[in-house]
Amino acid sequence: LVEQRARMQSRGEVVPLAIAAADPTAARQSAAAQGFKVVAVRGGAPWSPLVALSGLRLAPRAGFSLPLFCQELVSLLDAGLSLVEAIDLLSEKERRRSGAQVLTRLRGDLQRGLSFSDALAQQPEVFAALFVATVKASERTGDIAQAITRFLAYRQQIDAIRRRIVSASVYPLVLMVIGLLVAAFMLLLVVPRFSRIYEELGNELPWLTRVMIDWAHVLDDHAWLMLPLAVALLGGGAYLLSRATVRGALVRRLWRVPVIGRHLALYELARLYRTLGMLLDSGVTLPHALDMSGGLLSPTLRAGLAQAAADIRAGQPVSRAFERHGLTTAVSLRLLGVGERTGRLPHMVQRIALFHEDELGRWLEWFTRLFEPALMMAIGALVGLIVVLLYLPIFQLADSIR
């Protein structure tokens, strides 16, 4: 999550703007596409690899739940209340201080005569740019409730695929941690006890057993240093992962791995098409929708999207521009062509996103079913190797007695 300071064109004041983007450059481009003049860019909370693979948040957690606000607002509008009446009611019933401040300011902006989208835009740290753009497009038709419902559906789809990736990542990480803890327990406690039994054998021990025992002695003799060193290594790793340059280098290496790189691209394309479909369905123009969607992509695909947007503005068909700059698959290319011929491009873009999400979900299921047993076998092999090396001298002694 990237936090920016942007100058509002309408009032000329400096306000904070929160934008989901891969790096500061993408944040600047996204803000400029929305008509802001960027003063400074600052990174947000420490980055997590799981968050990067599962999707960036659409808005910061400022004590105000945007999905809950949307659900309550839609319910009140469907009940027949006007927009101002609905905001007044939500503001009066809000008990959390942070949420009450947001709604009070929103109500004040509406009473001063601002449109709903302009009032939302006054608090960019709370209301995502995609949400504001969706509401702004709906104000032309007067169907704000349907636009908010559409945004909620989009948010739920993005959150669903994120939960899939996170759930597929948690179990392997837990297995790895448990395996490392078991190996550390054996090296720090079990192996030193066996080494006392083998002291009289000296050089008669197998070479691998001697190496393992020597390492165990080193760890045992410097146990007071091992814990601070492990904490320092973990802290250093977390700090490096919080640096944009390090994250970029890691992501570029992952993109070079054939299978992983292909599915990373598939995930980003699914998110791109899902965002485009929601914006186009809300009435946002295609060039503006492309500009707003660019900040959600990695640098690998973001440059291609910018070039494709330039080609589309020059008059090229969407399918040809996307194909030329690597933003299509075989299926998406055909569906884009169908959408252009039938005039149902927003619907086809949503179909493409759904197809890619299903394909990604099937691959995640296959990967976890294959990777988890392989990881368990690797952990079992590591622990089994330590046990075998510990008992190998006993087996040799038994053979010599025979």
Image (cartoon, rainbow, N blue to C red):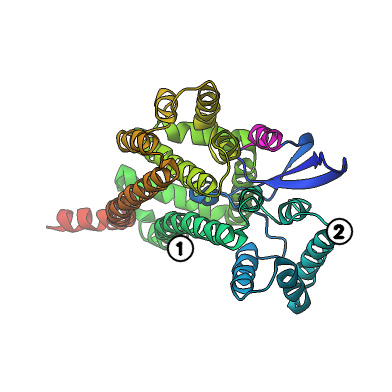
Residue contact between numbered discs 2 and 1, judged by CB atoms under 8 Å: no
**Looking at this view, is 376 or 62 the one in front?**
62
Label 2 element class: loop
Which circle marks residue 189 in the picture?
A: 1
Asked if one can make out residue 212 in the rendered structure from this viewpoint, the answer is yes
Q: How many marks?
A: 2
Looking at the rendered structure, the kind of residue marked 1 is Leu
Rounded to the nearest angstrom, the CA distance separating label 2 from label 1 is 71 Å
**x, y percentage for residue 258?**
34, 33
Bounds of the magenta span?
Answer: 23-34
**x, y percentage for residue 270?**
43, 44
Q: Is residue 32 magenta?
A: yes
Q: Quadrant of residue 31?
A: top right
Identified at 17% across, 53% down, the residue is: 400
Looking at the rendered structure, the kind of residue marked 2 is Arg
Q: Is residue 313 left or right of residue 208?
A: right
Q: Is residue 263 left or right of residue 79?
A: left
**x, y percentage for residue 358?**
34, 51
Q: Residues within 10 Å of mark 2 (few under 14, many from 20)?
A: few
Identified at 71% across, 53% down, the residue is: 117
Label 1 element class: helix
